[in-house]
Amino acid sequence: MNVQGTLRRKFSEAFMYLDTISYLLPIERKRVVVWLAFWLLLALHQCCRATPRVVLLVVPDLTCADLTTLPLRSSIEEFSSQGALGWMVCRAASNVPRSLLTAEGTDRLTSLLLSLGAGTRAVAPPDSFLAVYPPVPLGTMGSTLNVALLRRCYALNRRLEYPVDIGLLGTLVHRSGGATAAIADADNGFRANAALLVAMDAEGHVDFAGPRLFCAKGNLLAPEGAEADVEKMLSAFNQLPIKTRLTVISFFDLQRATEEATACLPAMAALYRQEALGRLTKLMQGIVEWLRGEPDVTLWCCAPGPGTYVTTDERLAPVLLMGKGIPKKGTIFAPSTRWDGLGLNSDLLPTIAQQLNLPNVPRSVVGRAWKFKEKGSVSLQSFCAYFRQLVTHAELQNLYGGLPILQLFCILGGVVCWRRRLLSPSVFGLIIGLLPALLLVLPALFTFNALIAGIALGISLMVIAAAAEWMSRTQRDAVAVLRTAAAVFVGCVVVDLLTGSHLMRQAWMSYSIMEGARFFGIGNEYMGALFGAALLLLPWLINEKGNWRLAVIIYFGIVFVTVWPQWGAKVGAIPTGVGAFGLALFAAIRQRISWKEFAWLCAFALLLFGGVAFVDLHFHGANESHLARALKGEGGGSLIVVVLRKLRMEEFLLFHSPWTAVLLGSLIAIGYFHRVQNANLGVVERAMWLGFYGGVVCALLFNDAGVPAAALLAQQGLGLALCEGAKQTDRLSEGIS
C-alpha cells in the first residue's frame, strides 16, 4: 500500500466534506467550520510532509555474472536507466584471528553486514554464536539481538585498534525520531540475526522485525529445503508505517543456492541459482513499482561482499541506487577513492545519513558520503566491463607490484658481477633504476591481460640488459643514461600528479584496489622511487649546471607537488623530502651540516606541515585528504591513535615484508661501494649519498609503510652505485689491455 498516497486522498476527501458542511450550515457557523478546516488541513499537511526514507535491499552472494543473467537483467537495466551504478570495495576488520574468517581466509558475511551498520570495518562473532542465540522479540512488532550475542560483538570490536560504533546507523535513525525495519527470507536463527545487523541500533533493537524476518516457505526441492516467499516479503513491506525511515530487506536465496552448489551437480546448482535470481527479480520489481508513487524514497540494492567462495584478492560488490536525489544514467563518485564508479563499504552509512538528513554523525565513521554524477549513458555491459577491468588490475598488482624478489636477484647479481666480472654491473644497475618507470608506463599499454603484461615486462627488462651490456662493451657511459632516465621519470610523475594521476591509477606498484589502502595521490612505493631518482640529478644540477638555486627550486617543487592535498596527498613526503633533499643541498652548498642547519630543516618541515594542514582543513571540505581527517580525529580515532596504529603497521612490515630484505641488501651493497670508492667521491657526490641515507631514515620513521618507500629510495642509489662500479671495471679492463 502507498501510505503517502492514501493520506493525500484522505486530505482531498476531508476538504470536500468540509466544503459541503459549510455550504449547508448557517452563515454564523461558517467561521467555526473554516477554523476547523484550517487546523485539520494543517494536521494532514504535517502527516503528508515529505520525509526522506531509504530502502536498502541487501543481497548476499550477488555477483557480477548474476547481473547479466536473463531473469535479473531487465531489473538491472532499469536501475541503470533510472538511477546510478557503482562498485563497492567491501572490507571487514583485518588482523583478526583465523577463527573469525571463512575457510578461504575471506571476511565473513556477518562481519561485512556489521561493518555496513557501523560505518567502519568491524568483526562479528563466529557463525555458531549467531545460530545458537536467535533474535529476541521486542514488544509485539520488533526484534533485538540476544544480550549474549550483542556483548560478544562489543567485546570483539573493542580489541581492534580503532573505535567501532556497533549499530550506529540504527542509532542515528532513532535519534532523529524515525523507526527502523528489517525484512528477510530467513529460515534459521543465523540468517535472522544477520538480517538485523545493518538496521539495529547500539542496543541491538529494530522497531519492526519479528515475523517479518522469517518470510521463507518450505520447499523440499529448494536449497536447504527453503526459498523466499516474495509475496509475503512485499506484503510485510507494504504494511510498514510511514514513520519507518530505514528499511533493510535481506534476500538470502542466492546464498542458499551458493551453499548448496558445493554438494550437488553443476547443472542442478545452475538451476537453483536461476530460480533464486527469478525470485529476486520479482522482489525488485515489486519494490520498484512501489517506489514510483514515493518521490521521497531512495532505493539501494547492494551485496555486502563479493560472495561466499571467492579468492582473497576480490572484494568488489555491486551497488545500485534510484529514487530521490539519484540522477538518471549516473554513477557514484566517492571522495574516499576519488574514482568514478568505485566506493567503499564504509561510505554507505554516511551516504544514507546524508540522504535521511541525520545529524551528528560521529567522527569514528571512516567513510565519506558519495556524490552522484550524470554520465548520460551507463550500460550494463560497460558496468560489468569496468568490474573486469578492476579485477584484472588488482591481479596485475599482485603479480608485478614492485617485484621485490626480482630486486633481490638484481642486488645479488650486481654484487657478483662487480666482483667476478661475469657481466657488466650496469646491467643490473639499469634494471634496478628503470624498473619503477616500467611499472608506471607499461600498465597504460598492457592493462587487460596478465600474460601479455608479463611478456611485455620481460622483453623490456631483456632489452635494458642487452643495451647495458652493449654500452659496457663500447665504453659508453651508463651513468649518463641512468640520470637521463631518472630526469624523465621525475618529470612524468610530477606532470601526472598535476594532471589527475592517470598513470598512478593504473600503475602496478601503486594503488591497492582490493585492499582499499590508497586510491588517490602517490603511494609510499612511488614516493621512494621519485625521491631517489631526483637525488640522482644533484651532481648534474650543481656540478654541470652550476646553479644551486635551480636545484633548490626543483627539489622544493617535487616535495610540494607530492604533499599537496589535491595532487600527491602524501604527508610522509614532508619529512622524507626534507631529510633527503634538505640534507643533500646543505651538504653540497655549505659543505657541512651543523646543528643550526639541522634546526632550520626541522623548522621548515614543521612550517610546510602546518601550511598543508591549514589548507587541507579549511579549503577542501569533502575532498580533504587523510591528514585533515586525522587532525580532526575522524575516520579511525584521534591523531595519536592513528600514529600508534601506523607504527604497529610499520613494525609488522619490518619483520614480515620482503621489502625489508631488499632494503638491507641495498644498504649493504651501497656500503661496500663506498668502501671501495669513497676516496674518489667529490663533495657533491658525498652530499648526494648523505641525502640517500637521510631519506631512508626519514621514510622508515615517518611513513605508515615506510619499508617499501625506503627500499625503493635506496634502490635508486644502488642502481647508480652499480653503474659507477661498471665504469670503474671498464677503466681497469682498459688499463690492463
Image (cartoon, helix red, strand yellow):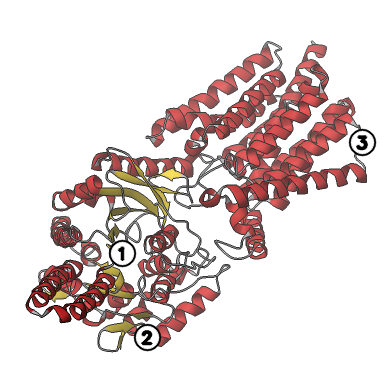
Q: Quadrant of residue 560?
A: top right
Whether 213 is drawn above or below 707: the answer is below
| Crowd around label 2: few <14 · some 14–19 · many ≥20 (10 Å) | many
Image point (50%, 64%), residue name: 365
Q: Quadrant of residue 24?
A: bottom left
| Crowd around label 3: few <14 · some 14–19 · many ≥20 (10 Å) | some
State which quarter of the image contains the N terminus: bottom left
Residue located beneath label 3 in the image = 592
Whether 439 is drawn above or below 539: the answer is below
Whether 87 is drawn above or below 345: the answer is above
Residue located beneath label 2 in the image = 146
Q: Residue furthest front?
A: 28
The residue under label 3 is which amino acid type? Arg
In the rendered image, residue 281, in percent from the top left (x then y), is placed at: 16, 57
Q: Nearer the viewer, residue 298 or 218?
A: 298
Q: Is residue 67 left or right of residue 202?
A: left
Q: Nearer the viewer, residue 369 or 380?
A: 369
Residue located beneath label 1 in the image = 54
The span from disc 1 to disc 3 (Cα, nearest Å) is 65 Å
